[in-house]
Amino acid sequence: MAVKKEKVIEVINFYLNTSEKETLKVFSITSETLHRYKRRYKECVTDFDLAINLKKIKENYTEKEIFAIAGGGRIIPGQDKVPIVDFSGKKYKFCFFTDTHMGSKFFHEDHYWAMLERAKKERVEAYYHAGDVTEGMSNRPGHIYELSHLGFEKQKDYAIKLLSEIKKPLYLISGNHDRWFIKSNGANVVKNIADNIKNAEFLGHDMGIVSIKKSNIQMWHGEDGSSYATSYRMQKVIESLTGGTKPNVLLLGHVHKMGYFFERHIHAISGGCIETQSSWMRSKRLAAHTGFFIVELTINKKGHVVSCAPTWYPFYC
């Protein structure tokens, strides 16, 4: 007696979603009968071969691997896991500037206001300042004549006035110029500035880390000097970081040079400066890259930076 088409479809659909052993047990049929049902099913359903191949894939790969294949992942012979290429994630845009040297006559307010205006148009979520917020006061001969604001109180108040115009989160570290006040009278000028601005946070001396969407953004200042090649200094800073302390993004200040490269899985950005070339830098034949960055990151669920788009805005002085 011929088996009804509906029965054949029921048995084979069950088989496609389970196993041959389970099918034989549930429907109390033999392997020979199951193969006969398969032939009959193939006559009724045109995509039976595709269904059989999909079943084989399901038997050989995990659910996660199947989703990876469906999303464009590749199976490489001898490789245990499926490499998943996915550049999606949440966007995070910020303004990165450094070495403002507020209190120096080489700091120009018009550059600062232009930066804030651009950052607002770009709708940045935060601002990062990698040190030398103020010019400080050294014992270098002639330095006092390069100051527009003399002393701790004047430079501090001036910086608070300007940085208070930033209405988004503002992250700051101190640089070597800021620490001249600590060396002379124990005054932490950058912390004092941050304490007087509602949305500002002082992260520390020379280095500070911010965690955003499971991704770490580290700022670095230092007291080393410029290198012949702009990228060399960035490279040496990255080499000094041990594996467990590596950030996803490294923002560097101090040498007044701009640059970007990707090394040891770190997006490294050297931020230039907001002040123009000082008399001291000119005497040492050191260029000043005056400008700022707007940086847009794409960060995935694991905290990996899957894309980094730093845009440099130079001031042609």
Image (cartoon, helix red, strand yellow):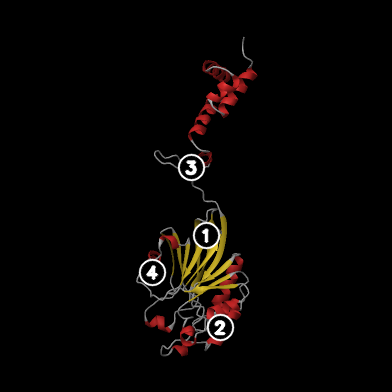
Q: Is residue 121 visible?
A: yes
Residue 207 % position (x, y): 47, 71
Spatial CA distance of label 2 from label 1 is 32 Å
Q: CA distance from mark 4 to mark 1?
A: 24 Å
Q: Amino acid at mark 2?
A: Lys
Q: Residue at x 54, y 84 (%)?
A: 155
The vertical placement of 69 against 150, above or below, is: above
| Element at label 1 | strand
The residue beneath circle 1 is 215
Question: Tag 3 or tag 2, which sits nearer the N-term?
Answer: 3
Q: Please name the residue that numbered disc 3 is placed on.
A: 73
Considering depth in this image, is 53 or 204 the residue closer to the camera? 204
Q: Upstream in the sequence, badge 1 or badge 3?
A: 3
The answer to which of 155 and 309 lies nearer the viewer is 155
Mark positioned earlier in the residue sequence (4 or 3): 3
Marks 1/3: CA–CA distance: 24 Å
Q: What residue would you read off at disc 2?
A: 156
Disc 4/disc 2 C-alpha distance (Å): 30 Å
Marks 2 and 3, how far apart in space?
A: 55 Å
Answer with mark 4 or mark 2, whichever residue precedes in sequence: 2
Identify residue for label 4: 233
Other residues around mark 3 within 10 Å, as few (<14) / some (14–19) / many (≥20) = some
Q: Provide residue 139's location: percent of width, then percent of height.
A: 42, 89
Q: Nearer the viewer, residue 262 or 176?
A: 176
Is residue 294 positioned above or below 283 on the image?
Answer: above
From the top left corner, tell me how far across and down residue 297 is, in percent: 53, 59
Q: Earlier in the sequence, mark 4 or mark 1?
A: 1
**Decide: marks 2, 3 in contact (CB < 8 A)?**
no
Q: Residues within 10 Å of mark 4 (few under 14, many from 20)?
A: some
**Marks 4 and 1 in Cβ contact (< 8 Å):** no
